[in-house]
């Protein structure tokens, strides 16, 4: 499974739709930012011009 496939599994809603509309090269570049980056896929999509996660930051689970 590629980084892009893993990334797709974690996105939903408008963020997933936006990510799927990107070129394969841009998808790979965005997913590559996740590996070892310490940011969530939702944060990375937003930082690359995509929409904010649905429900805002409160909708994201707190991982401990």
Image: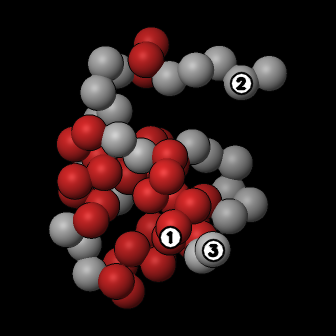
Nearer-the-camera pick, 21 or 34? 21
Nearer-the-camera pick, 9 or 19? 9
Indicate whether 36 appears above or below 28.
Answer: above
Tag 2 residue = 63
Q: Is residue 19 left or right of residue 5?
A: left
State the separation of the CA atoms marked 2 and 3: 23 Å
Nearer-the-camera pick, 1 or 40? 1
Q: How far across and down, in percent of the image, does residue 53 sit?
A: 34, 33
- Which residue does the image show at 49% across and 52% down from the upper left? 9
In this rendering, which labeled residue sits more in front, label 2 or label 3?
Answer: 3
Q: Earlier in the sequence, mark 2 or mark 3?
A: 3
Q: Is residue 1 left or right of residue 53?
A: right
State the separation of the CA atoms marked 3 and 1: 8 Å
10 Å neighbourhood of mark 1: few (<14), some, or many (≥20)? some
- Which residue does the image show at 27% across and 65% down from the upper left? 20
- Is residue 49 something that shows in the picture? no
**Quarter of the figure that contains the C terminus:** top right
Q: Earlier in the sequence, mark 2 or mark 1?
A: 1
Tag 3 residue = 1
Q: How far across and down, in percent of the image, does residue 32 sit?
A: 57, 72
- Which residue does the image show at 50% across and 23% down from the upper left? 60
Q: How far across and down, in percent of the image, does residue 57 sit?
A: 43, 21
**Quarter of the figure that contains the N terminus:** bottom right
Tag 1 residue = 4
Tag 3 secondary structure: loop
> Mark 3 and mark 2 in contact (Cβ < 8 Å)?
no
State the separation of the CA atoms marked 2 and 1: 22 Å
């Amino acid at each position: 499974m590629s980084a892009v496939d893993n990334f797709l599994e974690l996105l939903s809603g408008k963020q997933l739709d936006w990510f799927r509309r990107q070129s394969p090269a841009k998808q790979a570049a965005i997913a590559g930012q996740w590996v070892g980056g310490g940011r969530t896929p939702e944060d990375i999509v937003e930082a690359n011009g995509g929409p904010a996660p649905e429900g805002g930051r409160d909708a994201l689970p707190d991982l401990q």
